[in-house]
Amino acid sequence: MTPLGPGPVRACWGQGLKADCETLFPGESPEVLAREYDEGFARHLGKVRGEPGVGETVRALERAGIGTAVVTNSPAALARRILRFIDLEDAFDVVAGGDEVPRGKPDPDLLLLALDRLRCGSREAVLVGDTRLDLEAARAAGVPVVGYRLDGGDARVDRLLDLLPLLGVGKSGSPTPAT
């Protein structure tokens, strides 16, 4: 098998197992691919790092009383495993994985599941996304979206800590006074 290279991988990054089976591994079942991903991921877990500022940002949101969720096309168990490894397992209120809905992002089902678990309406939420699938899912769900190193959303941040002032939260986690 010929390696794909970075371009084709970036073009489909984050699309989820079902779409991976259709675009990258025709004829493979999502269950088999999930096992293979899990086995491969286990070999590389030691190389996983959280994005700079993610812990500080999420904990500041928590102190401000803002609920947080991980919304990923990856299986929920894998997402929890990554969060546990980078010591953020308890930092998020909700983890919603692509294996929990019939269709992952860009369909809005996954985002709507997370909103339901947070007991939050679409206009009360903000999705911070790093793929075009995130932008499309947020639009389909009626949720404002901030692109993380990505244009095309309602706003863009290049550092996660820059999200806090957009949400009216000081780095200490307290609400920023209105100006």
Image (cartoon, rainbow, N blue to C red):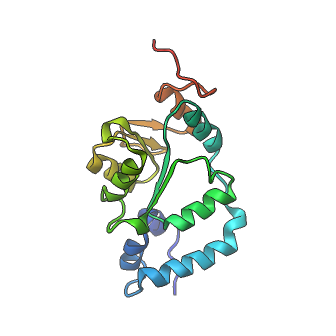
Q: Residue 7 appears at what percent x and percent y? A: 47, 65
Is residue 145 in view from this perspective? Answer: yes
The quarter of the picture where residue 61 lies is top right
Q: Is residue 88 left or right of residue 93?
A: right
Q: State the residue in front, 102 or 118.
A: 118
Q: Residue 94 appears at what percent x and percent y? A: 49, 51
Query: Residue at 64% of width from left, 41% of height from top?
Result: 53
Is residue 132 in view from this perspective? Answer: no
Query: Residue at 43% of width from left, 54% of height from top?
Result: 131
Residue extending farthest top: 179
Q: Is residue 137 left or right of residue 51?
A: left
Q: Is residue 164 left or right of residue 106?
A: right
Q: Is residue 37 left or right of residue 48?
A: left
Q: State the residue in front, 62 or 157.
A: 62
Q: Is residue 17 above or below residue 124?
A: below
Q: Is residue 45 above or below residue 90?
A: below
Q: Residue 95 appears at what percent x and percent y? A: 50, 56
Q: Residue 1 appears at what percent x and percent y? A: 52, 87
Quadrant the C terminus occupies: top left
Task: Report the label total.
Answer: 0
Q: State the residue in front, 147 or 120.
A: 120
Residue extending farthest right: 46
Q: Is residue 119 above or below residue 164?
A: below
Query: Residue at 64% of width from left, 26% of height from top?
Result: 172
